[in-house]
Amino acid sequence: MRSILITGGNGGLGLGIGRYFLQRDPEAKVWLGVRSNRSAAESLAAEFSERCFLLDLEVTKGDAWKIAVDRILENGGTFDVLVNNAGMHRDHLLATMPDEAWSDVIGANLDSVFLGCRAAIAPMMRQRFGRIINISSLSAVLPPLGQTNYAAAKAGVVALTRTLAKEVARAGITVNAVLPGYIETEALGDMDAEAKKQARMGIPMRRFGKPEEIAAAVFFLASPEASYVTGSSLKADGGIF
């Protein structure tokens, strides 16, 4: 049975990825890394009570990562797939950006990926197998105004992915990034109707993506069939870029 850890397991995208694995892979044991707002994650875990579990994880703390990985190994013996999905944004123009808006966003989106990858590498190298999928963003390559912090963090995720992929390729570990565009999750909740309309008009497909469409890309990259795909950055944006 494959052990899969998905951070940000309480959000729309994390839950969508978790459900996709659980529904399509009967050998998947999914761990949802959560910190707060647990109700939706608890519902998914109850639905798949024998194969889905919540895991307390503060993704910006190295000690928390060690505890989480140890628990997965103690429960299943292997740690096969890591999906670094946790993140946040606090948009400001750079000239007026508070220090904490910069540090918090870099921590949640980039430091967390570094810590998660570092924690996962040791057991994956012992196994001579592993799949790491880092959720970046279209903002990494096409940043909007007001997202210098978020765009810098997500661009860093892409660079980290490419570098780490080279370092661990001979150990049977692949490392890839997925760059979603506008996806129908709580991340769009702050946009008013007019802003959503304008955003939709900028997408050649004229619609927002669905969590399951991102989940499908993650599922493929986590599969044995993707064994020769590493260091890649897969955009899923409806053709914006």
Image (cartoon, rainbow, N blue to C red):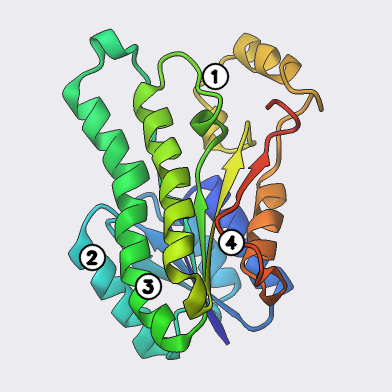
* Position in image of residue 241 (x %, y %): 68, 27
Residue at mark 2: 64
Q: Going by the image, does 184 lie left or right of 71? A: right
Residue 57 seen in the current view: yes
> At 44% from the left edge and 37% from the top edge, which residue is drawn?
155
User: Mark 1 or mark 2, which has the lower sequence index?
Assistant: 2
Q: Is residue 126 above or below residue 35?
A: below
* Position in image of residue 182 (x %, y %): 63, 31
User: Mark 4 or mark 2, which has the lower sequence index?
Assistant: 2
Q: Secondary structure at mark 4?
A: loop
> Dots 1 and 2: beta carbons under 8 Å?
no
- Residue nearest the viewer, comparing 114 with 229: 229
* Position in image of residue 213 (x %, y %): 72, 48
Query: Distance of mark 4 from mark 2, alpha carbons?
Result: 27 Å
Q: Given this view, does label 4 or label 2 mark the residue nearer the observer?
A: 4
> Dots 1 and 4: beta carbons under 8 Å?
no
Query: Distance of mark 1 from mark 2, alpha carbons?
Result: 33 Å
The kind of residue tagged 3 is Ile
Residue at mark 3: 121
Residue 35 seen in the current view: no
Per the rendering, the mark at residue 230 is: 4
The kind of residue tagged 1 is Met
> At 75% from the left edge and 30% from the top edge, which residue is drawn?
239
> At 53% from the left edge and 27% from the top edge, which residue is drawn?
189
> At 25% from the left edge and 16% from the top edge, which residue is drawn?
97
Per the rendering, the mark at residue 191 is: 1
The kind of residue tagged 2 is Ala
The kind of residue tagged 4 is Thr
Q: Given this view, does label 3 or label 2 mark the residue nearer the observer?
A: 3
Specify the quadrant that holds the N terminus.
bottom right
